[in-house]
Amino acid sequence: MAVWQYLLIVVPKNSIDNNYECIFKNNKTKYLPETDSFWKNFGGDIPSIISEMDQIIPKANWGNDTCLNWKGNGNTDEDNDACICLSDNKSKIESFQFRIDLRKACNITAVLQSILNLCEKNQLVLIDLKGEIFQPNLEDILKSIKASNATRFLSDPIQFFEDLSKNSSDETRA
C-alpha cells in the first residue's frame, strides 16, 4: 500500500450486528482481520458488483478467477485499486477492499464517490483501518480521510517521517 492511499474494507450492512464486535474490535494483530464471515449471508448480485467495478477502475493484469483486482494509473496520480476475493465456486464474496489515491481530488470526487454509489445500491458499508464503520456517505468518510496517515503524509511528508521515526524509537525503548 502506498503511503498516499486510503484503504476501506467493504462488508454487507446486515452483517455488522452479528460479526463486527468479535472480528474487528477483538483483533489484536497488526493485520486486518478476515472478513469472509461478514459475507456468509450476502445474497447480492456479485456479477453486477464486479461489472460495476470494471467501470470505475481498470482491471489489473494480475489475479485470477477468484481474486479479482483493479488498478488505476499511478503515473498520473490515479493509484486507486480494489480487490474482491471470491469463494472457490465463485458464488460468495470472501473479501472486498479498495484504496483511494489522495494525491488528486478527482480520485475522491469521481472514483470514491462511484464506489460509494455501488455500496449504497448493494447495501454495503465501509470500515476504515481504525475499525470505524461508515455508511456509504462521502461527508462521513471525509472525516476519516482527514485523520488518516495518508493525509498526514501528503500534508507534511518530512514531519510524517520524523514522527514515524520517533514512534519507532519509542517502541524500541519500551
Image (cartoon, grey):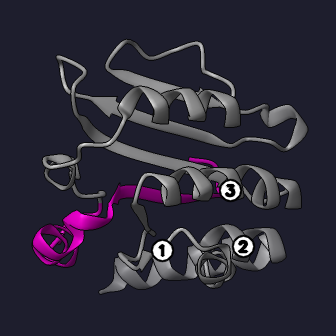
Q: Going 49% across and 81% down the picture, which residue do you hit?
A: 167
The range drawn in magenta is: 1-30
The vertical placement of 125 against 167, above or below, is above
Q: Earlier in the sequence, mark 3 or mark 2?
A: 3
Q: Going 76% across and 60% down the picture, which residue do you hit?
A: 108
The stretch drawn in magenta includes residue 134? no
**Disc 2: CA contacts within 10 A as few (<14), some (14-19) or many (>=20):** many
Q: Nearer the viewer, residue 83 or 16?
A: 16
Asked if residue 4 shows in the view, the reply is no
**In the drawing, does residue 100 fall left or right of residue 125?**
right
Q: Going 31% across and 19% down the picture, which residue do you hit?
A: 66
Amino acid at dot 2: Thr
Q: Position of residue 21 (x, y in %)?
A: 15, 78
Q: Position of residue 123 (x, y in %)?
A: 40, 59
- Cβ atoms at labels 2 and 1 below 8 Å apart: no
The stretch drawn in magenta includes residue 22? yes
Asked if residue 70 shows in the view, the reply is yes
Give the Cα separation between the discs numbered 2 and 1: 21 Å
